[in-house]
Image (tube, rainbow, N blue to C red):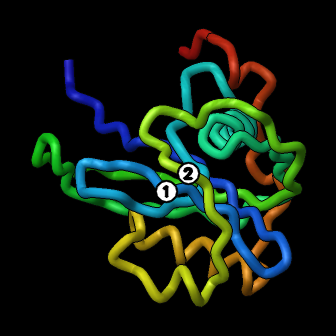
Amino acid sequence: MTDVWKPSVTVAAIIEHEGRFLLIEEATSDGIRINQPAGHLDPNESLVQAVVRETLEEAAYDFTPTALVGMYMARYVSARTGEAVTYLRFAFCGDLGRQHDQPLDHGILRTLWMSRDELAACPERHRSPQVLLCIDDYLRGQRAPLAMLNTHPSACGVENVS
């Protein structure tokens, strides 16, 4: 049997309100970092379901994605294992909903709202270069319809493939 290379699929929510972006501050192996509400795609969920879940877990807000801002590929060396990891990030913009009174996900210290310029002024605190890149793409008006994702109805279930 041959080893199959599999990138890590992640999602991120780009949420703007009055010129500021919803971000989270999180404890990582590299210290405290800033990121969008973001995380990994779980088994049996769609990309849209993942970004809705991650926004609720990390920022305690409901989120309704309306468009895909971009798809990003990046390779990093894991601080934990020393191995190269490839990430495929799907960034979504959309509508912010109700805030919930619930604890934030493990490792999330707090939410914060920052302007693009405030975020650009502290690149050493970004979880990755994709944090600012996604916001810049959003501000340029880059959007693709969610239908572009072509999620097959069985994508969130198990189907036999020959």
Who comes first in sequence, dot 2 or dot 1?
1
* 149 lies left or right of 160: right
Residue 26 can be seen in this image: yes
Numbered-mark total: 2
Residue of label 1: 25
Q: Residue at x 20, y 17 (%)?
A: 1
Q: Residue furthest left?
A: 82
Is residue 62 positioned above or below 31 on the image?
A: above
Q: Residue at x 41, y 42 (%)?
A: 8
> Tag 2, which secondary structure?
strand
Q: Residue at x 48, y 69 (%)?
A: 130
Which disc, if any, is residue 110? Answer: 2
Label 2, residues with CA under 10 Å away: few <14, some 14-19, many ≥20: some
Residue flagged by tag 2: what amino acid is it? Arg
* 89 lies left or right of 143: left
Q: Residue at x 29, y 31 (%)?
A: 4
Q: Position of residue 151 (x, y in %)?
A: 75, 36
